[in-house]
Image (tube, rainbow, N blue to C red):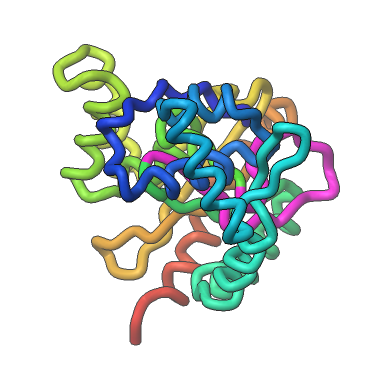
Amino acid sequence: MSSSKPPRATPSAVPTADRVLQVLAVLAQQGRTMAAPELMEHTGLARSTLYRQLARLKRWGFVLERDGQYAPGPVSLQLALGFDLASHLVPLARPAMTELCQQARESVGLIVAVNDQAICLDMVETSQSLRCSFEKGRSVPLRLGASAKCLLAHLPEDRRDALLDTHYGAHSPARAAALQELVSIRNTGYAVSQSEVDPGVWGCSVPLFRTPRQSVGAITLMAPILRAQDQASALIHMTVVAAARISRELTPP
């Protein structure tokens, strides 16, 4: 699923002390090397400010540079390893995700919301072909597609509304339509989309709960539309059952 180009940030929107983290977050979200002009476009930082932040990140090993291209450095990999070791969500979810993948013969992702992004924490891949932007560590904007809409629908209302204001404007008809769709998703218990982010890809996303009111993420079953169209109801049911199993594992005794 190819992510849409984010709007240019404004320097005033990010506190000065957070700008180094902003640069690192942009590099992490893109999942590829980036040149300084592109980083300036994504962050809204002036060239001199950007180079100061990059120099700090390079000095600490968070960023590597080669021929004017920048990418996350080795310390970032250590952070990722530490997350894998410390996260309880991934090991609790993986058995049910693996079973769902085997049953449906389609790929299953574990997705969480961070700021305005839907981030893939884990992925169980099918042996069948699927062209999809989600893989472990990748993210898409928290706006389009089953995963993003499912996560957005189950955020606290104040955070959901703030993101809708950012995406659509506070009083636009598009915002009202988006809110109505999110309320419907919350009531239904799952989100379904097709070709909203990746052409030809169908997805079903179901929330995961630690408590009845606290969603901690979602699992998403992804398949080509041609494989999903004749068995959509069965695939949705399988995903709902798998998500309920994971939620039971997450629920405190």
Expressed as whole percent of the image width and height from the top left, the position of residue 41 reads 49, 22
- Where is the N terminus found, in terms of image quarters? top right
Could you say which is closer to the camera, residue 172 or residue 104? 172
Could you say which is closer to the camera, residue 208 or residue 139? 139
- Where is the C terminus found, in terms of image quarters? bottom left
Tell me what residue is drawn at x 37 percent, y 27 percent. 9
Residue range (magenta): 116-137
Image quarter of residue 46: top left
Above or below — where is 50 with respect to 249? Answer: above
Above or below — where is 5 with respect to 184? Answer: above
Side (left or right) of 82 relative to 144: right
Tell me what residue is drawn at x 27 percent, y 33 percent. 13
Could you say which is closer to the camera, residue 136 or residue 108? 136
Number of callouts: 0
Tell me what residue is drawn at x 77 percent, y 33 percent. 67
Side (left or right) of 163 relative to 22: left
Question: Can the viewer see residue 238 in this picture?
Answer: no
Work out which residue is located at the far top of the displayed protein and give it: 173
Expressed as whole percent of the image width and height from the top left, the position of residue 223 reads 69, 37
Expressed as whole percent of the image width and height from the top left, the position of residue 222 reads 64, 41
Q: Is residue 215 magenta-colored? A: no
Work out which residue is located at the far bottom of the displayed protein and give it: 253
Above or below — where is 252 with respect to 50? Answer: below
Image quarter of residue 117: top left
**Magenta residues, dominant SS class:** loop
Side (left or right) of 131 relative to 238: right
Could you say which is closer to the camera, residue 210 or residue 44? 44
Tell me what residue is drawn at x 42 percent, y 36 percent. 142
Question: Can the viewer see residue 175 in this picture?
Answer: yes
Expressed as whole percent of the image width and height from the top left, the position of residue 82 reads 58, 73
Side (left or right) of 40 relative to 164: right
